[in-house]
């Protein structure tokens, strides 16, 4: 009779061994990069109560992450302009692969898996040609580079799966950068941000550009509702103190809607949307501003602000079953559902920009 050990060895040899799942790790709700008190960097998995279920070392500061839809694997992306993305087995903490874009490109901090988990898509900068790129990686071939296509604009940052059709939606911030100039913005007078809706083959399906007077409003971060509506957060590159919208809603074939119009409290965002998220029922949408130290919540029906929470150095944001979770550079994780905000956990960490939901 075959032994269990021999059976497992045979599975390993055939590459068929069962892989760890997110449920086996306690079903984390979010991923977030952070910085420890000793200056080291990490990627952590948190549950809905803000407790840390696992923490994994990173070689440098992280920005966002992508969670495999089925396996307990995460890809942690370097902060722009970074050239590493580490694929980590979250059950063991082992690095499965380190992704590096081809020469002349760098990552822009975000990525997303295809629905079946067979491909990873990454936002990248072709900095010699001032061209945005979406990198394609073959997951089942050990995360081998499988190709790339145009992002549909300049300076792609966030990207998400469409919910109304197969494909991607990309936030092209419109800002040209070059690693020789660090994080300097090289084309502000001529920037043209957009939302590009792309097929998985790179074909352009739709493009949204804002009106000319908002061309300095860089489209940076995205959230997508079940009906395909896209929420986007912007970062104003013009004069400080300008009264400009920071949150928008769009769906292909429909006009764009800019939220909070005429509400003087939107100035508290200080022209900077850090993260954005729909509520689970998509009746509300929230945006954070670490520069303003606020989270603002808007109704998606009438576009009016329904709540404002003042939280120091807040940026990470994601939906909870009821309300939102927010994370700060001071190590706190909050539950936002009404007022005031309720602190869930205080960690000896500085949370970075994003809370990445796993569902």
Image (spheres, helix red, strand yellow):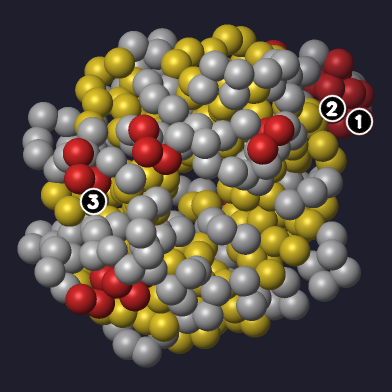
Left or right side of 38 for 183: left
Pointer 1: what residue?
A: 5
> On screen, 185 above or below 252?
below
Pointer 2: what residue?
A: 8
| Residue name at image x 28 percent, y 64 percent | 242
Q: Which mark is residue 248?
A: 3
* Mark pair 1, 2: CA separation: 5 Å
Q: Nearer the viewer, residue 41 or 92?
A: 41
User: Between disc 3 and disc 1, whose residue precedes?
Assistant: 1
| Residue name at image x 37 percent, y 38 percent | 189
Left or right side of 117 for 303: left
Would you call the spot at circle 1 few (<14 residues within 10 Å), some (14-19), or many (20 or more)?
few
Q: Nearer the viewer, residue 142 or 23?
A: 142
Whether residue 265 appears in this view of the structure is yes
| Residue name at image x 65 percent, y 82 percent | 346
Looking at the rendered image, the quarter that the N terminus falls into is top right
Q: Which mark is residue 70?
A: none
Picture quarter containing residue 43?
Answer: bottom right
* Mark pair 3, 2: CA separation: 51 Å
């Amino acid at each position: 009779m075959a032994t269990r050990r021999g059976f497992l060895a045979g599975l390993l040899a055939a590459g068929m061994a069962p892989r760890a799942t997110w449920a086996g790790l306690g079903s984390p709700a979010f991923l977030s990069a952070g910085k420890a008190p000793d200056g080291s960097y990490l990627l952590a998995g948190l549950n809905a109560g803000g407790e840390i279920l696992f923490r994994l070392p990173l070689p440098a500061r992280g920005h966002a992450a992508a969670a495999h839809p089925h396996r307990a694997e995460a890809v942690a992306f370097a902060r722009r302009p970074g050239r590493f993305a580490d694929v980590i087995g979250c059950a063991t903490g082992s690095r499965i692969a380190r992704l590096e874009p081809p020469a002349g490109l760098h990552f822009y901090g975000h990525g997303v898996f295809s629905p079946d988990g067979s491909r990873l898509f990454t936002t990248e900068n072709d900095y010699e040609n001032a061209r945005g790129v979406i990198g394609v990686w073959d997951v089942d071939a050990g995360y081998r580079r499988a190709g790339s296509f145009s992002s549909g604009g300049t300076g792609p940052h966030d990207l998400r799966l469409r919910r109304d059709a197969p494909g991607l939606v990309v936030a092209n911030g419109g800002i040209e950068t070059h690693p020789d100039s660090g994080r300097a913005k090289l084309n502000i007078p001529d920037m043209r941000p957009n939302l590009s809706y792309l097929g998985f083959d790179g074909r352009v399906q739709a493009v949204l550009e804002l009106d000319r007077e908002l061309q300095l409003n860089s489209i940076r971060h995205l959230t997508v509702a079940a009906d395909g509506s896209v929420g986007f957060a912007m970062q104003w590159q013009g004069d400080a103190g300008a009264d400009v919208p920071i949150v928008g809603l769009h769906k292909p074939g429909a006009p764009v809607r800019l939220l909070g119009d005429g509400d003087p409290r939107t100035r508290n965002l200080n022209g900077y949307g850090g993260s954005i998220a729909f509520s689970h029922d998509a009746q509300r949408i929230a945006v954070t501003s670490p520069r303003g130290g606020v989270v603002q919540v808007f109704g998606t029906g009438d576009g009016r602000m329904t709540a404002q929470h003042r939280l120091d150095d807040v940026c990470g944001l994601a939906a909870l079953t009821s309300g939102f979770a927010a994370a700060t550079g001071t190590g706190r994780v909050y539950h936002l559902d009404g007022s005031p905000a309720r602190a869930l956990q205080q960690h000896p960490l500085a949370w970075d920009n994003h809370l990445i939901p796993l569902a």
